[in-house]
Structure formats: structure tokens, C-alpha cells
Amino acid sequence: MNAFICSSNEDIRKRLLTILSDNKIDSRIFTSADELVEILPVSPIVNLIYHLGSNSCSESKLTIIQKQFKEKLNTLVLDNSPSPDQGVRLLNMNVRGYANSWIEANKLITALSVIEQGEIWAGAIIIKYLLQKSSEQKIINSTETSILNKLSEREQEIAKHIYAGKKNRDIAEELYISERTVKAHLTTIYKKLNIRNRLELSLILAEKHN
């Protein structure tokens, strides 16, 4: 795993660099979005930790970066004062994750692992917000028939594990299948339910249980 760190805050940069180094994750530091843009055209696919702060690492600059390089980036945005509105806005920009700037070290590593798999990482406040607004915004079109009836027995098992917050590796071990098989089942589940990721799957199941 590798990661780019983009932050104008020296304390944040040092902390993130230490966490990544302790977990043997190769990283590269950028103090501004402008520096980052110079290297992205020749960069392979990378995990990007983008700390929203001064004008040098602003949301407006991130918007441009996401539009130009979304195929190359698995972006985790950190903010000193995260808010639901901002989180949803960023997720709609194809940002993969959103968290507090001082996220715990173990959660940061988990978040990077999740977004590297193309999944979504969002804090409880964002998920709660989406649940509250899901009917109003029509995020999920629920039906009277149980949503799980569209899935095979194995797919239902995997969906329930996702709802429980388990990672692909844990699901594979528990069901005695490969991680690749879990990913294949998830792809089928997303297609059957017309959704994009495990966050939307969790929202569907949360609505079913409410």
C-alpha cells in the first residue's frame, strides 16, 4: 500500500507520516494541492489523504483534482470540523472517505484499506445523516418485498456481514471462501440492487431493520 499526503498543516503532516511509517506504508508529502497536481499526471493509482485547511489545500482545488484524476485516486478527506453536509458533498465528488483530521491511527489504516478496495469510508455521523435523509432524498427506493429476496442465499449471508461492518478478508475467513469470491459476490449484489458500494448496501439493510 502507498499513500500521498496533502496538507498545509505541519503537525498534521508529521502525525500522518508517523502513522503510515509505523504501519510500513510508503508515503509522499505535499504541502499544497498545486504541488500534488504536478505529480499526478505521471503517478500510478494512489491512495490520497487530503487534509482540508488553508487555501493551498482547499475544497475547491480538491474538486478540480477529483474531476481530472478520479480514475487514479482513492481519496480520503480529513477535516478539523467534519460536517454531514460537507461529507455528503465530498462523497458525491467521488471522494472515497471522510473523517476527522485527528482520526485514530488504527482507524486511519482501516480507512485506507477500505478505500483502496474501492469502497466507502464514512463516520457514524455521516451514515446517521444519510439514514435520516434517505427517504427525503430517495437515496434508496425501498419496496414492500424484502430487499434480500432479490439475492441468493450466499449473497444474503455476505450482505448481512457487510451490514455488521466486517471487512472482505473477515467475511472470506468466516465463510471459508476466497477474498476474490467475496468481491465477486459484492459486485453481483450491487448490480442486483442497483447500488454502488457497501455504504449504500448498509443503508438499505438499515432501513429494512428500522
Image (spheres, grey):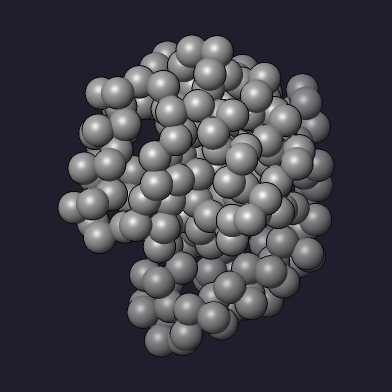
- Above or below, 176 against 91 in this view is below
Name the residue rendered at 53%, 69% in the picture.
Answer: 158
Name the residue rendered at 36%, 26% in the picture.
Answer: 101
Q: Nearer the viewer, residue 68 or 189?
A: 68
Q: Nearer the viewer, residue 137 or 97?
A: 97
Q: Which quadrant of the view contains residue 25?
A: bottom left
Percent across and percent down for residue 50 are 49, 33
Q: Which quadrant of the view contains residue 62?
A: top right
- Going by the image, does 18 lie left or right of 188? left
Name the residue rendered at 68%, 35% in the picture.
Answer: 65
Percent across and percent down for residue 142 are 77, 44
Quadrant of the image for the C terminus? top right
Q: Is residue 77 visible?
A: no
Percent across and percent down for residue 2 are 41, 58
Quadrant of the image for the N terminus? bottom left
- Above or below, 126 against 120 in this view is above
Name the residue rendered at 69%, 38% in the picture.
Answer: 66
- Going by the image, does 124 lie left or right of 16? right
Q: Nearer the viewer, residue 179 or 193?
A: 179
Q: Is residue 70 visible?
A: yes
- Going by the image, does 191 lie left or right of 184? right
Percent across and percent down for residue 34 are 59, 29
Q: Which quadrant of the view contains residue 94?
A: top right
Q: Nearer the viewer, residue 93 or 28?
A: 28
Across the whole image, how many numbered discs are drawn on residues? 0
